[in-house]
């Protein structure tokens, strides 16, 4: 059974304090590892897709990396507006087969 | 602006009543999905549809029903048979192997 585990569950950072969120996965035939941002009361917003080990993608203060077992979302010098829940998901098989983690709730304090 | 519209944002119902959640997209995506989100759990797939007039059960379809009469629309009915209907419901769409594109959800409370 496919599984995606995110850690930590919650993370509190001072503004400017860089850190990383972890996503461990066991997904058979991984076709893509997805990162989403979700604000309270809203739907997830797509951030990145990573397809193969060694791949990296960046967007503003966020950088996502992928190994054969894990993905990391690195946040450099975060700002309060980066506060959100970050979801990781693994896609396999048909495009309806996406397994989501439970998310990391990030709070950035001014 | 292209996107997915879910309505209403909040919905309150009494136990024993069926309720229908609306989902409309203008992205011209072939595939549409319904997910349920509960605190401390990952998103779980309820139903999905790859083409008009065809849909398949996801992991937690019991107590739910859907229809796909138009490409743009994929309503979800939460029936009285659903044991634990209070949740945040998310509709999504995609093309081929592209990432899911989500609406802003409907929060259903059943008392």
Image (cartoon, rainbow, N blue to C red):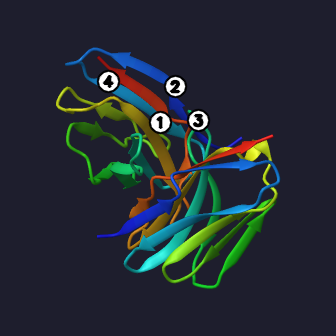
> The residue marked by circle 2 belongs to what chain?
B
Q: Residue at x 57, y 78 (%)?
A: A51
Q: CA distance from mark 3 to mark 1?
A: 20 Å
Of circles 3 and 4, the one toward us is 3
Q: The disc numbered 4 marks a residue on which chain?
A: B
Q: Are marks 2 and 3 in one subunit?
A: no
**How many numbered marks are there?**
4
Counting from the top left corner in percent of width and height, residue A93 is at: 38, 73
Nearer to me, B61 or A52: A52
Q: Which residue occupies 33% across, 29% down? A: B86
Q: Are marks 4 and 1 on the same chain?
A: yes
Label 3 marks a residue whose chain is: A
Q: Establish if A53 lies above or below B64.
A: below
Chain at tag 1: B
Task: Report the disc number at residue B23.
Answer: 1
Q: How dense is the environment of label 1, judged by Cα within 10 Å: few (below 14), some, or many (20 and up)? A: many
- A17 with respect to A68 (left or right): right
Horizontal placement of A76 versus A21: left or right? Answer: right
* The residue positioned farthest toward the left in the image shown: B81
| Whether labels 3 and 4 share one chain | no
Task: Give yes or no for contact between labels 4 and 2 (Cβ–Cβ under 8 Å).
Answer: no
Residue B19 numbered tag: 4
> Residue A104: x, y in percent?
55, 52
Q: Quadrant of residue A77?
A: bottom right
Marks 4 and 1, how far apart in space?
Answer: 13 Å
Location of residue A98 with respect to B40 vertically, above or below: below
Residue under circle 2? B9
Q: Is residue B97 visible?
A: no
């Amino acid at each position: 059974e496919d599984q995606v585990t995110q850690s930590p569950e919650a993370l509190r950072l001072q503004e400017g304090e860089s850190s990383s969120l972890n996503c461990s996965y066991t997904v058979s035939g991984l076709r893509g590892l997805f990162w989403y941002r979700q604000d309270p009361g809203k739907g997830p917003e797509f951030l990145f897709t990573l397809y193969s080990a060694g791949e990296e993608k960046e967007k503003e203060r966020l950088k996502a990396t992928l190994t054969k077992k894990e993905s990391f979302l690195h946040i450099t010098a975060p700002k309060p507006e980066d506060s959100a829940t970050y979801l990781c998901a693994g896609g396999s098989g048909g495009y309806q087969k996406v397994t989501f983690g439970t998310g990391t709730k990030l709070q950035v304090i001014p | 602006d292209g996107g997915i519209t879910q309505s209403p944002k909040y919905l309150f119902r009494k136990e024993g009543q069926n309720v229908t959640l609306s989902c409309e997209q203008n992205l011209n995506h072939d595939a549409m999905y319904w997910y349920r989100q509960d605190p401390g759990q990952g998103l779980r797939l309820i139903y999905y549809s790859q083409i008009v007039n065809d849909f398949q059960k996801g992991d937690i379809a019991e107590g739910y029903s859907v229809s796909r009469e138009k490409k743009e629309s994929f309503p979800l009915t939460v029936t009285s048979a659903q044991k634990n209907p209070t949740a945040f419901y998310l509709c999504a769409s995609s093309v081929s192997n592209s990432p899911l594109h989500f609406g802003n959800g409907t929060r259903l409370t059943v008392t």
